[in-house]
Amino acid sequence: MNKNFKAGVVSVTFRQYAYENFIKYTKLTDLSCIEWGSDIHIPYNDNEKANNVADKMQENNLNTVSYGSYYRLGTGRQDIFPMILRTAEIIKAPSIRVWGGESPSSKLDKSARDAIINDALETAALAKSLNKNISLEYHRNTITDNPESAVDFIKAIRDGGGGNIYLYWQPNQYITFEENKSELEKICPYLTNIHVFAWKDAERFPLEHHKDIWKEYINIIAEQTHDIDNGEHNFLLEFVKGDSIEQFVEDAKTLIELLNG
C-alpha cells in the first residue's frame, strides 16, 4: 500500500449503532482509521462522550483522521465553531470536515460567496492555532459542487492566507464515470480525504462491483502532485449495500486490496 494512503470508514455508515459497537465492527476488518460524525456519534457539545470515544479508540489501536462536522460556512453560525474545534481536539482529529454553505454554487451571488470565503478564513485561522486542517465536502448544493467553483474557492482562500483549507472528494453517482474522472483530476491538487462507495443513481452495490472504477480513481490520486504538505490521503468507506455488517467487512477487504495495488 502507498505509505501515504490509509483505509478507513466514516461513522455515518452505521448511524444506527452506538459508538462502542461501531468500533467493534471496525475491528472485524483491517481498517486503521475512522472519521467520526457530529450528527449522532459525537455531538459537538458533548465533551464527555468525545472523551469516551477517544479512550475507546486508543484501547483499540485506531486513529481518528477527521471530525465530520455539519458546520455550514457562511450561514451565521460562527458561535458553534469553537465547540466543534474543541471536540476535534479531544478526539485527536487532525482535520475537520465542513460544508460550503447550503446552496448550489450557481445560485451564489458575490455577497454569498464572500460570506462563505470569509467564514472559511476565520475557521481556518482558529483551526491553525491547534494545528488542524479544514476540508470541505465536494458535494452537490454547496460552493464546492463542481470543479470550477471549488478551485476558484480554494484559490480565493489561498489568496486570503488560508493555507490549511482543502477539499474532500467523492464520486457523484448521478454523472458518468468519465465526468467523475475529469472532476477528480481538476480538484486533485487540493485533495485530502476521499469518501469511497459504490452507487449508481440511488442504488448501492458491493464495492467489488466498482473495483475497476476505483482503480482508476486511485491511480489519478497517486499520480498527481498535492497541495497538502504530507501528501496523506485517507480512503474512507461511506455507506454499504443494505447497511449490512457483512457487506461492510467485504467492502473493507476490497478497499484494502485496491490500495495495495
Image (cartoon, rainbow, N blue to C red):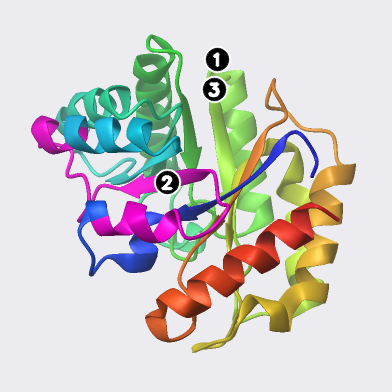
Helix, strand or loop for disc 3: loop
Whole-angstrom CA distance, mark 1 to mark 3, is 9 Å
Give the magenta part as a residue range: 21-50
Q: Residue 144, position in %: x, y?
A: 54, 52
Q: Quadrant of the C terminus?
A: bottom right
Whole-angstrom CA distance, mark 2 to mark 3, is 18 Å
Residue assigned mark 2 = 35
The disc placed on residue 164 is: 3
Closest to the camera, between mark 2 and mark 3, is 2
Label 2 or label 1, whichever comes before in sequence order: 2
Q: Quadrant of the N terminus?
A: top right
Residue assigned mark 1 = 161
Q: Nearer the viewer, residue 232 or 85?
A: 232
Helix, strand or loop for disc 1: loop
Is 231 drawn above or below residue 149 in the view shown?
A: above
Please rate how many residues cluster around mark 3, counting C-alpha atoms within 10 Å: few if below 14, some from 14 to 19, many from 20.
Answer: many
Q: Amino acid at mark 1?
A: Gly
Closest to the camera, between mark 1 and mark 3, is 3
